[in-house]
Image (tube, helix red, strand yellow):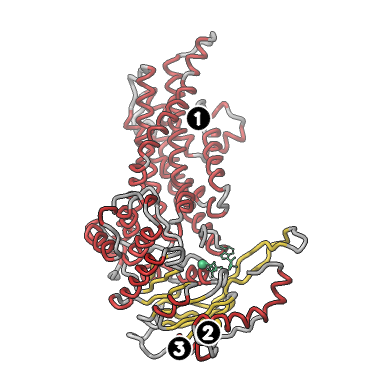
């Protein structure tokens, strides 16, 4: 069994005001899952922990990257903070608002970009951004001015802003997704693998833009990624989430030092490798490798 | 970014309501060809029903063809109207899940009642336009005489009945949240059941007694009866008051009930991770 290995060090006192941007304490989430038995039949549904007591604090303006393998719980964490899932224990506050009690207040502060750029595919970028901004209380007058500006900033070609989304490349769609998130001026930006599946050039462009947001916006960013270089180059602190537990959360240099590793990748393998061995028994009895 | 205060909150929610209608309008525009296809389909369906009156006469039955044709037309048009309203509400969740936008809509500060009522308002406006077009086209096709028809009464009745339809539609909208695969189909079962007990092409009095009891709580019963009276006999709004007040009562109850059912479904979906599609 995993111990709740929380080696989170209190962040440097960089707060602009009293409350932390994000404060997550012992957050837990479980899903019901039908596990396959060894003989191939389906067993009863069992509760399966996706997050096993995660704690972390983010200061305003800080960028934190969360690294983790498939199924480690990154998206679950993002969804909990976006008010899209209800928790099974612990607490989470965003700028002092309880995510599970004051969902309305939290929603105004947060926006998100996920792996898939999700849009009404027959509608254009401008139409998709327009109605989405309306849900955040932005009037047509505001969006007529802001949407072209923001599309320009993410490097989206103006002449395609009336084309149906289905005709745009993945990279372009992802830029529109970034534009949608920024349009509502979120103070907390949740980026869930924003560059996964993009070609090297699009990836660079999106990363460049995230870097720009960091310097020009008053945004706190939580970035979930599989890309170690991305994490190292964009984030102030990097956390490693493994099988629902946050193993460490520290500055990249500290992580390398802690695991005596030359690169962040080596540190990541050192951290998660150890855990894999510990967990061997559990996986065997479950018959799956999550 | 967003100023506090009730007035500003109200303003933001109204803008959000406009956004729901705006988005649906974009979709209507983008799927314009589909609209034509759908119109033809509805018209064909309606015709198969409405021809029954002539068929009865041709096989020796003695009926007032004009009157029976009008009754059948009213039933068929209300059936398709209800179909449109329910379909749009059921798709609140189903369509957005298919497009993958559901999580973005559900994490926005737009309140759920405003969101659902916005869907309902769009559904009603769009449904009334489409139903009116089919009604006019088929009536012209048969050269139906409706010398006494009081269309204002009919419109008032359909408008008030629609409040209840929206409330019931909200309850069906929740089904795809609970069962992503099969939820939508259940919505259509609801539509069919409601019209059967409400006397869509016949008076409720021909039904077995237990169905008559169910008919009493169905808003479609009063809508159909009142609209028939308005179009066939020219009953004015005052004359159909007996059908209007039950509709108001059912409407006042069904909206809060619909919202409460949806809220429970949303909680369930958030508890069990049923909102997401992938990722
Ligand atoms: N809606 C859901 N229903 C059931 N189980 C879920 C659901 N969402 C996540 N899980 C389970 O919770 C665990 C964590 O999933 P999560 O999506 O958070 O991982 P992730 O780190 O984002 O993975 P990836 O890198 O593949 O995106 C997985 O075992 C997954 O199967
Ligand atoms: Mg994920």
Say yes or no: labels 3 and 1 on the same chain.
no
Quote the CA–CA distance across marks 3 and 2. 13 Å
What mark, if any, has residue A253 been given in the picture?
3
Along the line of sight, which residue is nearer the eye, B205 or B144?
B144
- Quarter placement of the C terminus of chain A: bottom right
Tags 3 and 2 touching, CB below 8 Å? no
Quarter of image, res A119: bottom left
Quote the CA–CA distance across marks 2 and 1. 66 Å
Q: Residue at x 33, y 46 (%)?
A: B26
Q: Residues within 10 Å of mark 1 (few under 14, many from 20)?
A: many
- Chain letter behind tag 3: A
Tell me the SS state at disc 1.
Answer: loop
Vertical arrangement, residue B210 with respect to residue A66, above or below:
above
- Chain letter behind tag 1: B
Q: Nearer the viewer, mark 3 or mark 2?
A: 3
Quarter of image, res A242: bottom right
Q: Residue at x 45, y 40 (%)?
A: B246
What mark, if any, has residue B200 been given in the picture?
1
Residue bearing mark 2: A248
Q: Residue at x 34, y 75 (%)?
A: A211
Along the line of sight, which residue is nearer the eye, A25 or A71?
A71
* Residue A272 % position (x, y): 59, 80
For this orientation, the residue located farthest to the right is A39
Tell me the SS state at disc 3.
Answer: helix
- Chain letter behind tag 2: A
* Residue A248 % position (x, y): 53, 84
Say yes or no: labels 2 and 1 on the same chain.
no
Q: Nearer the viewer, mark 3 or mark 1?
A: 3
Quote the CA–CA distance across marks 3 and 1. 74 Å
């Amino acid at each position: 069994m995993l111990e709740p290995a929380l080696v989170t060090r209190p962040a440097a006192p960089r707060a602009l005001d009293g409350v932390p941007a994000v404060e997550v304490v012992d957050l837990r989430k479980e899903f019901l899952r039908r596990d396959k038995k060894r003989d191939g039949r389906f067993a009863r549904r069992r509760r399966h922990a996706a997050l096993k007591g995660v704690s972390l604090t983010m200061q305003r303006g800080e960028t934190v990257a969360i690294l983790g393998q498939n199924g480690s719980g990154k998206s679950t964490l993002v969804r909990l903070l976006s008010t899209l899932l209800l928790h099974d224990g612990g607490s989470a506050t965003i700028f002092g608002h309880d995510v599970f009690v004051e969902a309305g207040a939290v929603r105004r502060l947060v926006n998100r970009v996920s792996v898939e750029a999700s849009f009404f595919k027959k509608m254009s970028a401008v139409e998709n951004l327009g109605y989405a901004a309306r849900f955040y209380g932005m009037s047509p007058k505001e969006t007529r001015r802001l949407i072209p500006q923001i599309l320009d900033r993410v490097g989206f070609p103006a002449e395609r802003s009336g084309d149906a989304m289905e005709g745009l490349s993945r990279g372009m769609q992802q830029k529109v997704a970034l534009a949608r998130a920024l349009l509502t001026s979120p103070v907390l930006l949740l980026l869930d693998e924003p560059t996964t599946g993009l070609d090297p050039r699009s990836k660079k462009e999106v990363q460049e833009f995230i870097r720009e947001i960091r310097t020009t916006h008053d945004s706190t960013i939580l970035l979930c990624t599989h890309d170690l270089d991305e994490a190292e180059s964009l984030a102030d602190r990097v956390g490693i989430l493994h099988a629902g537990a946050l193993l460490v959360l520290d500055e990249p240099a500290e992580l390398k030092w802690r695991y005596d590793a030359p690169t962040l990748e080596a540190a990541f393998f050192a951290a998660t490798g150890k855990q894999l061995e510990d967990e061997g028994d559990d996986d065997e009895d479950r018959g799956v490798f999550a | 970014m967003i100023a506090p205060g009730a007035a500003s909150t109200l303003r933001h929610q109204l803008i959000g309501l406009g956004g729901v209608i705006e988005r649906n309008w974009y979709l209507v525009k983008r799927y314009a060809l589909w609209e034509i296809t759908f119109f033809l389909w509805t018209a064909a369906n309606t015709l198969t029903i409405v021809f029954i009156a002539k068929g009865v006469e041709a096989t020796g039955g003695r009926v007032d063809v004009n009157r029976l044709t009008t009754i059948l037309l009213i039933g068929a048009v209300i059936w398709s109207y209800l179909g449109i309203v329910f379909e749009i509400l059921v798709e609140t969740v189903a369509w957005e899940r298919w497009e993958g936008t559901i999580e973005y809509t559900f994490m926005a500060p737009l309140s759920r009642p405003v969101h659902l009522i916005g869907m309902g308002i769009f559904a009603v406006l769009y449904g009334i336009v489409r139903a009116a077009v089919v009604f006019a086209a088929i009536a012209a096709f048969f050269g139906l005489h409706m010398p006494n028809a009081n269309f204002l009464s009919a419109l008032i009745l359909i408008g008030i009945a629609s409040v209840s339809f929206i409330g019931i539609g909200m309850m069906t909208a929740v089904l795809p949240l609970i069962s992503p695969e099969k939820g939508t189909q259940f919505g259509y079962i609801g539509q069919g059941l409601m019209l059967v007990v409400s006397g869509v092409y016949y008076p409720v009095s021909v039904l077995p007694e237990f169905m008559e009891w169910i008919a009493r709580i169905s808003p479609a019963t009063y809508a159909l009866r009142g609209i028939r009276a308005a179009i066939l006999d020219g009953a004015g709004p005052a004359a159909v008051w007996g059908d209007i007040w039950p509709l108001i009562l059912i409407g006042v109850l069904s909206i809060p009930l619909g919202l409460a059912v949806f809220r429970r479904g949303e909680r369930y979906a958030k508890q069990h991770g049923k909102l997401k599609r992938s990722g």
